Amino acid sequence: MESDAQLETRHNADGELESVISMLERVQARYNYLPEEALRKVAAETGRSMVDIYGVATFYRAFSLKPRGKHLVSVCLGTACHVRGGPIIAEEFERQLGIRRGETTADKEFTLETVNCLGACALGPIVTVDGHYFSHVSTGRVKKILQQAREGLDVVEVKADERVFPVEVSCPHCNHSLMDERHLVDGRPSIRVTISFGKKHGWLCLSSLYGSYNVESEYPIPDNIVAHFFCPHCHGELLGTTDCPECGAPMVRMMIRGGGMVQICSRRGCKGHILDI
Amino acid sequence: MINLKINGLDVSVEEGTTILEAARFIGFPIPTLCHNDGLSPYGACRLCLVEIGEPPRSKLVTSCTYPVEEGLIVRTDTERVIRTRKMVIELLLASSPMSKTIQDLASKYDVHQQRFKQEFEECIMCGLCTRMCEEQMMAKAIGFRGRGQNRSIGTPFDITSEECRRCGACMYICPICMARCQGPQEESPLCNACLNLSPPCVETYGQKMCYMDPCVACELAGPYRKDKQRKEKEESAPVAR
Ligand code: SF4
Ligand code: FES
Ligand code: FES
């Protein structure tokens, strides 16, 4: 951790300091491990003693005190995957990467670990790489999986996501449809919400084509502004469940007709989005 | 005030008292290992088990962490409790046979065997030292690290802690640090059991036990100790062909 790096802390709605775990999670996400200074900062910030923080940091497998590789490969050795050949897969990964389980390659590209059940037993043996699941893995596919990971799994995903298709959404609070038949964006009915930023408060029409970022609004929205989004019918804020994976701004949540949920980033110009069907 | 029954005796104690405190208050001894009067209850060693409720729906709970309840029926010396307690001691013996505290417990509670894989642990994770450091020394220099099999007690990053002021309280309270005497049978998991007494009353009176500590009758019984008698009988018995 660079010594000048600040550990930003967050407070919940009641003004309470967030929990140690979420602080550590953020540090882990940022540096891919928990540097000693960061643990000391968390201790100082929360007023807890170092042993407490260290205890938490060593208790959870999600945290690591040693730098982890860029890509995390988890091979399932749970009962079901074990009988379907998980150990052979793990060995193949060890051979291909030249490391043993629990270790990180010298170039800091891959960390290999084994886990006990990833919750998809019927599809075993399961391997996850950076949160992407690979089912029915055979030794022959190991090389390809690593190759894919090197190229970047997220890149592949986003490309797949950019198939442009129309969605119809509704408010997660009142379930009222947010579609505006009269206002067309991209030649299709748009998604109409109310937004507010600074002292401005007005309507915003989003393109209903998933993958298109065209909007029209009452006021021009400056780039990089984080706005609040509201349902024009019940005036409930369309608050997302997480923060934007790209920029960390709060997400905006809308329900998809026919099941599922789409979340978009509330920062103007950020293309962060999550689609959950 | 809360009214409960301990071994048939009506007791009334203040709310928030634990069964252990209540039982000790009226004089029923309950062995403990991870409990210390100056520290918060922890419930790690399971030695202080007592039976609550009426059979067949009775259950075993750790008395050091169980707060008294109105109308609770507690028995501290049923056969089930004794059996389980012996098993707990046996397991403790299996992990740390070199501890005097555990050997003394084994002799006092009549444990004559150790049937598990022998290990030589230096820590039984009773948490006495961490609680001592935190609650009495206000230092919080040591704590638990890791989990499961890899759980251990120590300082963060295993380096000398800045918080520690070398008071030695953690060593003082540790039940494992004090080594047992090296009696004639030092190789065995059990020491020579110089204190080994088997109360002759258990079988005769069943659940109505005497609570003399140490039991005078047992001590007098010396040469007639049951285990000795049993052994002699076995030795003198004609070998079946
Ligand atoms: S010696 Fe150090 S670690 Fe042990 S109780 Fe004292 S302050 Fe805590
Ligand atoms: S055993 Fe591998 S997913 Fe459950
Ligand atoms: S004294 Fe109660 S569990 Fe250890």
Image (cartoon, grey):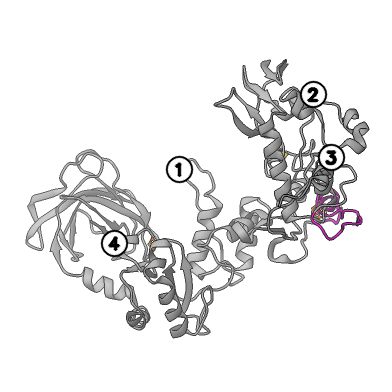
Residue B1 or B101: which is nearer the viewer?
A: B101
- Mark 3, residue position: B229
User: Contact, CB < 8 Å: mark 1 with mark 2?
Assistant: no
Q: Position of residue B171 (x, y in %)?
A: 84, 53
Q: Within 10 angstroms of label 1, few (less than 14), some, or many (20 or more) residues?
A: few
- Same subunit, labels 2 and 4: the answer reads no
* Image disc number at residue A13: 1
Choose top left, top right, bottom left or bottom right for residue B41: top right
Q: Within 10 angstroms of label 2, few (less than 14), some, or many (20 or more) residues?
A: few
Cα distance between the residues tagged 1 and 3? 73 Å
* Image disc number at residue B25: 2
**Which residue is the extreme one toward the front?**
B241
User: Contact, CB < 8 Å: mark 3 with mark 2?
Assistant: no
- Mark 3 close to ligand 3, CB under 8 Å: no
- Mark 4, residue position: A273
Q: Compared to A67, does A272 lie above or below? A: above
Residue A91 or B162: which is nearer the viewer?
A: A91
- Magenta stretch: helix, strand or loop mostly: loop
**Is residue B15 visible in the rendered structure shown here?**
yes
Residue B183 located within the stretch drawn in magenta: yes
| Residue span colored magenta | B165-189
* Labels 4, 1: front one: 4
Circle 3 sits in a helix, a strand or a loop, which is it? helix
Please give the name of the residue rendered at 47% of the width and 65% of the height, measured from the top-left corner.
A29
Q: Is residue B179 left or right of residue B155?
A: right
Q: Position of residue A172 (x, y in %)?
A: 25, 44
Residue A175 or B236: which is nearer the viewer?
A: B236
Q: Compared to A76, does B163 lie above or below? A: above
Please give the name of the residue rendered at 65% of the width and 53% of the height, measured from the top-left corner.
A52
Cα distance between the residues tagged 4 and 1? 24 Å
